[in-house]
Image (spheres, grey):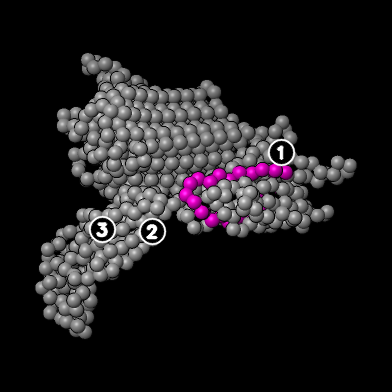
Amino acid sequence: MKCRLLRLALALGLVFVWAFVPPVASGDDTISAWGYTITAPGTYTLGANLVDPNDPAHPYAIVVMPGVSGVVIDGAGFSIVGDGNAADYEGGIWLPTEDGTVGSGRAVGTGLAHITIQNVVFDALDIGVDGYGNLTDVRVEGCTLQNLTDWSGIEFRTESTGGLALLQQTIDGVVIQNNEIKNSLGIPVKLANYGFTTNPLTAMRNLTVAGNRIHDCDGTAPHEETSHAAVWLRYGATDVVIRDNLIYGNADLSAIWLGGGGGGGAYTNLTIQGNRCEGQSGFWDKAGTKPADGLTLDGITLPGTVSIQDNHFLGNNGYGVNNTTPGATGTVVAEYNWWGDVAGPTGANGDGVSSGVDYDPWHPVVGGVQQNGGIGFMPAASAIRVGNSVVVDVFIAADGMFGFQFIVDYDTTRLTATSATLVTDWFDGEFSPWNGVIDDVAGTVKFASSLSDGDTPPNGMGVVARITFRGDAAGVAALSFSNVKLVRFVGGEQGTEVITPVGEFDGSITVLGEGTIAGTVRLQGRASHAGAVAAADGDSDITVAAGTYSLTVPEGTWTVTVEMARYLDAVKTGVVVTAGGTTNLAQVVLEGGDANDDDVIDILDAGIIGGQFGKVGAGITDPRADINADDEVDILDLVLMGGNYGDTSPVAW
C-alpha cells in the first residue's frame, strides 16, 4: 500500500505539471518524441520509436489528459522503449483522471472516454498502459508488451487514497484483446477496484480480456502485489468476460486470479471460457507458499450468472481451479472443462481442483458417456529463426485407446519437416504403418499405430509423436490436424469403435526473419579498439581494431550490450531489427578506469592503479591497472580513471 501511495502522489503531481506545461497538444498528429500530451480528440500515430530520455518531469511517453474523449493511439508498429531499469520509473501510456469529487462543483463522473490503443510495442518499461479513475470504453488491442521490469503490463484501477478518497470513480467498458505479453516482471493484466474498500462510489463493470497470449512472465517485481496472476482482478466487478486467452509457461503467477478482501469481492455475472491455462510454475503468493493455479478464486462471492467451461487446465503447479474460501464463496461450478486426463482433474494426469469446485461432468464426458479428450500440439505455439529448428510433440487424451491415425498439416512455404517419429512411452503400438511419413510437397506428416491382441489400452493422456520442423521463411505457419481417428477395440461382430475427438487443438510456429545490428565502439585512451564484446539475443561479436561489430538476430526489438574489461559497459534498449535489414547504431565510447569491473569507477580502482603505478612489462603484477593496455601503468591510466571518477555503468549511448 505504501508503494501505491507513493506512486499515486507522483501521478497527481505530474498531472499538475503536464496540465500547465504540455510538451505537445493537438488532434490528429504524428508522435515522434517522448513526453507527448494529448488534450484533444483525434488519431495519434507513432512516427518513430519513443525512447525514454530519463527526464523525471516526463516519466510517461504519452499522456491523455482528463476530460478528453475520442482518442486513437496507433503504434504503426513502432515501440515505446524504456531503459529496462526498475529503479527509475517510466511508463508507456498514461490515462489519469481526477474529476468527480462530490460537492466540489465539478461534474460528477467525467474523466476519459472512448480511448483506443493499438499496434504499439511496449519494451523495457516499468508499466505499459496505466489508467485510473473514471474511464469509459477503453480498448487495448494488438499490442506487444515485453521485457517489462516492474508494475504491470496493462493496468486499470480505481483509487481511494490521498486526495482521491472522496471521488466518484467508475471504470465502465474495458477491452483488452489480441495482445501479446511476454518476458516481463510484474502482473501482465491488472484490473482492480481499490476504491471499494473505503469508497462506495467506486465501481468496475463491463470488463473483457480476450484472445491474449501471455507467456514466459514472472510475477516477482520490485513493487509486486501480495498475490500474482497473468490476469489479475481484485475487489469485485460486474459483467466480467475472460475468454480465449493462451496463458502458459509463466513463473510465480496463477493464470487467472480473482480476489476479494475488505468486503469487495463480489463478481456479478462472470464468464471464464475457452482459455488455455498451461504450465504455470512457482507460487501465486508473495510468501511463496501457494502453488500457481490455472484459476484462483480467492475470497470472493459469485452472484448472478457464472460460466466457467471449455477451458484447458494442464500442468499447472497448483490446482486447475482453486476455490480458496468455499465457506464464503460456495461451490464453484466449473463443469465441461478439460483437465489433462480423461478421468478428469482427479486422474493421474489431471490438474486437480480444490474443495468447493463442481467439475463433473468434464470434457471428455459428454452426455454421461466417456469420450476421447482431444489431440493437440505441445508447445501449442513456438518461435524460431529462419534456418533453425524446433521440436513439436503431439499428445492424445483417450480412454481405452487401441489404435489411432492422424495427419499433421503444415505450411510448406515457411516450414520443412526434417524428422518425424512415433513416441512409444505411453502408447507402444506393435503395428505402425505410418511412423512419421513426411510429404514435404503436400505439407503432411502421417502417423498410425495399433496395439496387438492382449495388449492393455492406455488411459489418460500422453505424447504419441514427435516432429522436428525447420524454419525456411519468415511468418506464422499454422499446424493443424486432419483424418483423425481414435479407435477402441470392442470385439464381437463390430470389432472396433471409432471416437470423434471432443477437441482438436491446433498450433503454430512463428518463423522469425533475421537482420543485422552493426556499430562502432571506441575505447578511451587506446589506439586499437579491438576486444570489446557486443551482444544481443545470445549472439555476440568481438570488435576489431577499428571498433566495428556486427550481430545477426531475429526480427524484433532487442537490447544491445557492449562490455570490455577495465571499462564501463554500455546498454542500448529498443533496437528494432527488420527481416533482411541492417540497423546501424550510433558510435558508443566506453569510459576507461573500472579496473575491478564492478561497474563503478571509485576509490577501489584508484587503489589498484596506484599500487602498480610506474611498473612496466613483466613488472606489472596486477594487469587490471593497465587501463589502456600499453604495457605500462602511468599517468595515462591514472587520468582515464580520474577523468571518469564516480561514473557508473551503463555509459551514455
Choose between 519 and 64: the one closer to the eye: 519
Q: Is 92 rendered above or below residue 437? A: above
**What is the quadrant of the C terminus in the image?**
bottom left
Q: Quick one: label 3 or label 2, which is nearer the N terminus?
A: 2
Horizontal relation, residue 365 to residue 392: left or right: right
Across and down, in percent, residue 64 comes to: 27, 30
Is disc 1 in contact with disc 3, using a CB cutoff of under 8 Å?
no
Q: Quick one: label 1 or label 3, which is nearer the N terminus?
A: 1
Across and down, in percent, residue 453 comes to: 83, 54
Q: Report the magenta stretch's main SS.
A: strand
Question: Mark 1 falls on what kind of element?
Answer: loop
Is disc 2 in contact with disc 1, using a CB cutoff of under 8 Å?
no
Horizontal relation, residue 554 to residue 518: left or right: right
Give the residue pinned by disc 1: 500
Q: Is 312 rendered above or below residue 510? A: above
Choose between 25 and 638: the one closer to the eye: 25
Give the residue pinned by disc 2: 552
> Which residue: 58% across, 45% down?
479
| Segment colored magenta | 459-485
